[in-house]
Image (cartoon, rainbow, N blue to C red):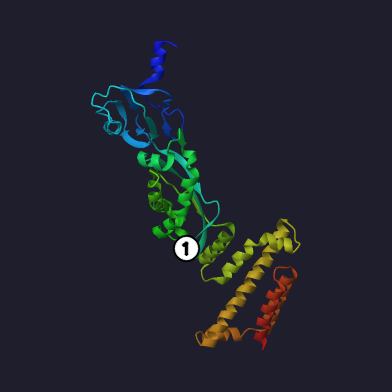
Amino acid sequence: MGLVDFIKKQFIDVIEWTESTDGVLAWRYPFEDREIQNGATLVVRESQVALFVNEGKVADLFGPGTHKLTTQTLPLLTNLKNWDKLFDSPFKSDVYFFSTRQQLDLRWGTSQPITLRDKDFGAVRLRAFGNYAVRMADPRKFHTEVSGTREVYNVADLDGQLRGLLLQHLSDAVAQSGIPFLDLAGNQIAFAKALSEAVAPSFEALGLKVEGLTVQNVSLPEELQKILDQKIGMGMVGQNMGQFMQYQAAQALPTIAAASGQGSGVVGDAAGLGAGLALGQVMAQSIQQGLQGAQAATGAAPAAASATVGIQPDEIMATIEKLADLKAKGILTEDEFSAKKAELLKKLV
C-alpha cells in the first residue's frame, strides 16, 4: 500500500450524506478505522442535520451548510476531549445524519372496529383510515430515545409504533372534536385536525412531528350500517307510516317474488309488487288503528275513536284473509299472523 492510500484510509477530509435511499430517518457515517482530519469539511444539505457523538455523549449539532471542523466550530466536542486551542491532532467521533424532510403517505387504519361514545347513538363501533406525514423535529431526542447507535434507521422500523399511537388517540380525537358520528363523514378535515392534535405529544416524545394527517373514510361495520340505513329511511319518510311500509315492501320485491314462486319477469314482478303493497297497506292500517285506539282511550281524539269503532265486520274479515294469504306465502310468520288476527278480531267484539 502506497503512502497516499495509507493517508486516505486514515484521515477523512469530507463528511457528507447523499440520501441515496428513500425512507431513511437516521444514518451513521461509516468511519471504520479512519479519523477526522483537523480542518475537515462537513457538508450538510438542505433537509438534513448532522450530530456529533463522542464516546456515547451527544455533542455538537450542525444544520444545512458547509462547515470547517475546528475548535471554533466544535466547541462542545473540543471541551469533551480537552484539546488545546491549536487542535492539531485528528480525532475520532461518530457522526449521525438525520433527514428532516417530510416522510409522505404513511398509512394508518383500524384493523378492527373501535367502540366510541357518540352524542346521537350513545356508543358506536367505528372504522376509519387515512394517511399522514412525519418529519424529524428533535434529532437529539430521536437519537437518544429511538435510533441509538444503529447504522441505519428507516421509517418502516417505526411504522407499527406510529400507527398504534394514532389508533390509541382515535377515541380522544372524536371526543375532543365534539362531532357526532353522522357528521364525521362531512367534517373529515376537522376530525383529522383533532386527531393530529391528540397524537402530537406522543410523537414529540420520540423527537418527531406529525404533519398532513388525513381521514379518508369513516364507516360502521356492515351490521350496524344496515340499522343506520333503516333509521335514516324512517327519518326521510317522517310520520307517514303507510308510505314507509310501502317503501319497505318495495325494497323486498325480489324476496317476495321468490317466496311466492312467481319467478322472474313482468308477471313475477307484478305479483311481487301486489303482495308487497298489500303487506304495506295491511300493516300500516293495523298500526294506524292501534294509534287511533290509544287516542280514543285517553280522550285525545274522539273523532279518530269514532272512526275506529265504525269499522265494518266484512272489512276486518277481508283484512284477516289478506294476512292469511301473506302467511301462506311465507311473508308473515305464524306469530305475526296470530298477533294481527287477534288484534283485528277484538274489533268485532
Q: Is residue 103 above or below residue 176?
A: above
Residue 200's x, y, as percent? 38, 49
Residue 122 in the image: state x and y as whole percent.
Answer: 48, 66
Q: Report the residue at 71% width, 70% height from top.
A: 326
Residue that label 1 marks: 117
Name the residue located 51 percent from the left edge and 84 percent from the top edge: 301
Can you see residue 130? no
Pick the front one: 67 or 349: 67
Taking the image as shown, residue 279 lies to the left or right of residue 27, namely right
The N terminus is located in which quarter?
Answer: top left
Can you tell which quarter of the image residue 33 is in?
top left
Q: Nearer the viewer, residue 109 or 265?
A: 109
Residue drawn at (38%, 16%) of the image? 7
Counting every numbered tag in the picture gives: 1
Q: Amino acid at mark 1?
A: Arg
Q: Is residue 118 above or below residue 186?
A: below
Please tell me in which quadrant of the rendered image residue 262 appears.
bottom right
Q: Residues within 10 Å of mark 1 (few under 14, many from 20)?
A: some
In the image, residue 178 sits, relative to residue 150, either above or below, namely: below
Toward the viewer: 233 or 335?
335
Q: Nearer the viewer, residue 293 or 143?
A: 143
Q: Position of residue 68 (x, y in %)?
A: 28, 24
From the top left corner, tell me how far across and down residue 289 is, in percent.
Answer: 59, 80
The furthest residue to the bottom: 349
* Quadrant (top left/top right/bottom left/bottom right) for the C terminus: bottom right
Mark 1, secondary structure of its residue: strand
Which quadrant of the figure has residue 250? bottom right
User: Is residue 307 at least partly visible in the picture?
Assistant: yes
